[in-house]
Image (cartoon, grey):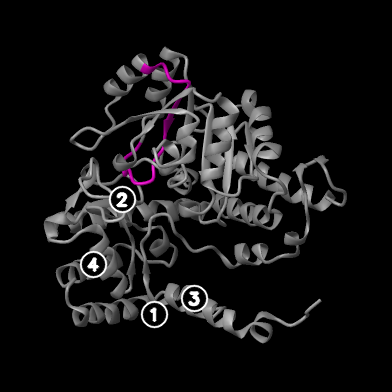
Amino acid sequence: MNKQNLATFDPQLQEMIRKELDRQESGLEMIPSENFVSMAVLEALGSVLTNKYAEGYPGKRYYGGCEHIDSVEELAINRAKQLFDAEHVNVQPLSGAPANIAAYFAIMEPGDTILGMDLSHGGHLTHGHPVTSIAKIFNFVRYKTTPEGLIDLDNLRSMAQEHKPKVILVGYSAYSREIDYPAIQEIANEVGAITMADIAHIAGLIAGKQMNNPVPIFDVVTTTTHKTLRGPRGGMIMCKQKYAGAINKSIFPGFQGGPHENNIAAKAIAFKEALEPEFQNYARQIKLNAKVLEKKFQEFGYKMMFGGTDNHLLLVDVTPQGLSGKEAEKALDIAGITLNKNMIPDDPRSAMDPSGIRLGTPALTTRGMKEMEMEQVAELIRAALDNHKSEEKLLEVRNEVHALTKKFPLYPELV
């Protein structure tokens, strides 16, 4: 076995990692689905737990030598149950999309109908977009928001009565408003549908008690463990006890083999962090920071989708500024501000060159930035968009970005 460390054995890769660390340290990370994990989470991801195969579940493994692995996984499960008030938890999904797909197969049969949100109105690819393979197996019917940017519950009820879906799905990747879970559960009860929520983006805000929690209400809830929850890249499924067996079988042996126990250990750490009282302050600050951006963008005359934000993200139509979402993303990249191009409701443009940009506050809040910094960030974004055709001006903005980020070191232990 090669006993050299990374820097000695593979300096080429080490340099690539160093450059990525420098990019994260020196830039403003504003993609709503990205965040920065703690050193403890990084340590767990690089632990010896990566060496162990553990197909199955605690107490029911297909391999021997899993007694300590069982303890790790049970710890993660118990912490997640406490955090979200869940009856049953499966922490093995490798990410959010596999978690959603496994949940579908656990509660539906091929050909069944699922009523979910249209992608351009804030939904997710796995919520039934025609380009996905899963759309060939289940019948997805997609609802939309109103012109005012809200979910029309009367329309949702009418669609549910018309299509009689097996599942009603809520939870979004670009929608910025709160969700009325009891009202949607009531609609589901009227048509005999199973309720499912994908809280991947807002799980941390729910854990921090800053947004409504669907877990005690809905039948099945999926999430990622990164994003606002600030854990490792991974997924999780929570459900009522009546669905526990089907969910577990759908994950293993249905879709996955051996779980990544180093990742599950990192999830356990993230859940412990989220159970601490200060995490509620963190979640509250995420929303406060997003509200500052909302106010500033309104002052700038930017066209915000859904009328504003109740969570961590904003979806902005940049075509009135004379550029596309793709052009805005590229200009902001040069300026050291990372966000993503994104479709707006009923976007006339394509997904690869859409009309909007999506940005959020979790990663900047993790670094310690608050309202005053958000005002500065908003001004930097405006300066970059106003000068998107001038690389010289964009590099001037980048220098200001670097000056700001130096005040909020990310991983001083790694620099």
Report helix, strand or loop for mark 3.
helix
Residue depicted at x 32% and y 20%:
159
Which amino acid type corresponds to the residue marked 1 in the rendered image? Answer: Lys
Q: Earlier in the sequence, mark 1 or mark 4?
A: 4
Q: Name the residue under label 2.
A: 351
Q: In which quarter of the image is the N terminus?
A: bottom right
- Kindly report the distance in space between the C-alpha atoms of the residues bearing marks 1 and 3: 13 Å
Q: CA gap, disc 1 to disc 4?
A: 18 Å
The magenta segment is: 163-178
Residues under labels 1 and 2: Cα distance? 34 Å
Q: Name the residue under label 4.
A: 381
Of pointers 2 and 4, the one earlier in the residue sequence: 2
Name the residue located 22 percent from the left edge and 53 percent from the top edge.
355
Residue occupying the point 41% across, 16% down: 164
Q: How far apart are marks 3 and 4 (CA)?
A: 22 Å
Reading the chain from its start, which is encountered first: label 1 or label 3?
A: 3
Residue 314 located left or right of residue 208: left
10 Å crowding of disc 4: few (<14), some (14-19), many (20+): many
| In the rendered image, the vertical position of residue 324 relative to residue 6, given as above or below | above
**Residue 21: which numbered mark, if any?**
3
Residue at image mark 1: 406
Disc 1 vs disc 4: which is toward the camera?
Answer: 4
